[in-house]
Image: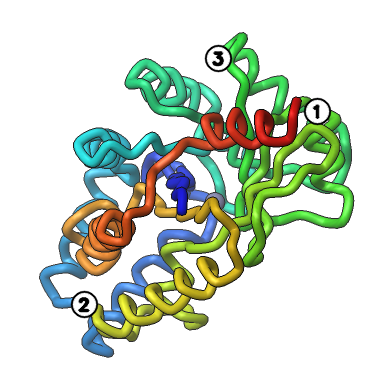
Amino acid sequence: MYVIVSHDVDHLTAFEHRTDLILPKFFARNLIETLNGTISFGEMMSRTGEVFRNRWQHLEEVMDFDRQQGIPSTFFFGVNNGKMLAYSLENAAYWIKRIHENGFETGVHGIGYSTPDAVKKEFETFQQILPGVPFGIRMHYLRHDENTLKFMDAAGYRFDSSIREHKAPYKVGKLWEFPLHIMDGDMINQGKRYGSKSFEEIREFTRREIAAVVDKNVRYLTILFHDRYFHSSFSVWKAWYEWVISYCKENGFVFQSYSSAITELNSVNGH
Ligand SMILES: [Zn+2]
């Protein structure tokens, strides 16, 4: 079994959310998780501190961890705003280049999905940041309709990884779809808006989900972890990511990037 790890970058700073409802919702969620005993008072205070430090990404820390673990992960960045993705193109471009220079792959965290022009525009914007480097996409909130994959293919994306289903990679035109299997929030919150599960319950749920995917013979297991949670103020989230990586290793799974997987899939397909 191969594993492809990716990170969606939904935030860079806290202040980029000054005009939306993210911050009040964030404080409410932290309060509820403290009152229901999911997180400690100290953790709640530490999350609050992160807001005032105005740092809502842990990209360097995730790169350090992934490098140490030998994980060729991919980082998806928004190059457009919408659905509460609010950081500037300038900030996105800085990090896209920095992550690329560090030897990791980057791609688009897509906003527009319902017209060919909207999909193409984000493709072109990203291409200008890293000219000559092929890339793929994951939609923010996994939004798509029946035409989105066709629009992505026409725009020039090499792959997408937005469709949540227990399937092996498949082709739509020249685009490879890598269905998304294991997402941090699905495992940790398990259908609720707030955390309420113990770490053991979360691990058990994740083991079952991975087993269900392995049973379907998909060959490429995909895992999504949001970099923002790689911090002691989200101790369960961070511990979950570290654990799921070691769990994959214990099971003899081999880490790949989307692009190395595509090279292999294309050679098998005789292209
Ligand atoms: Zn997102």
Q: Is residue 268 visible?
A: yes
Looking at the image, which residue sits at the far bottom?
36
* Cα–Cα span, label 3 and label 2: 40 Å
Does residue 81 appear to the left or right of 17 in the view shown?
right
Any mark on residue 62, and which? Answer: none
Any mark on residue 130, and which? Answer: 3
> Whole-percent x and y of residue 237?
29, 64
Mark sitting earlier along the chain (3/2): 2
Mark sitting earlier along the chain (3/1): 3
User: How is the rendered protein coloured?
Assistant: rainbow
Which sits in the foreground, 161 or 108? Answer: 161
Which sits in the foreground, 217 or 197? Answer: 217
Badge 2 crowding class, 10 Å Cα cut-off, few under 14, some 14 to 19, many 20 or more, is many
Mark 3: secondary structure: loop
* Cα–Cα span, label 2 and label 1: 43 Å
User: Vertical placement of 62 versus 252: above or below?
Assistant: above
Mark sitting earlier along the chain (2/1): 2
Residue at figure coordinates x 47%, y 60% from the top left: 22
Q: Amino acid at mark 3?
A: Leu
Any mark on residue 155, and which? Answer: 1
For disc 2, the marked residue is: 39
Which sits in the foreground, 83 or 156? Answer: 156
User: For disc 1, does the CB lie below 8 Å from ligand 1?
Assistant: no
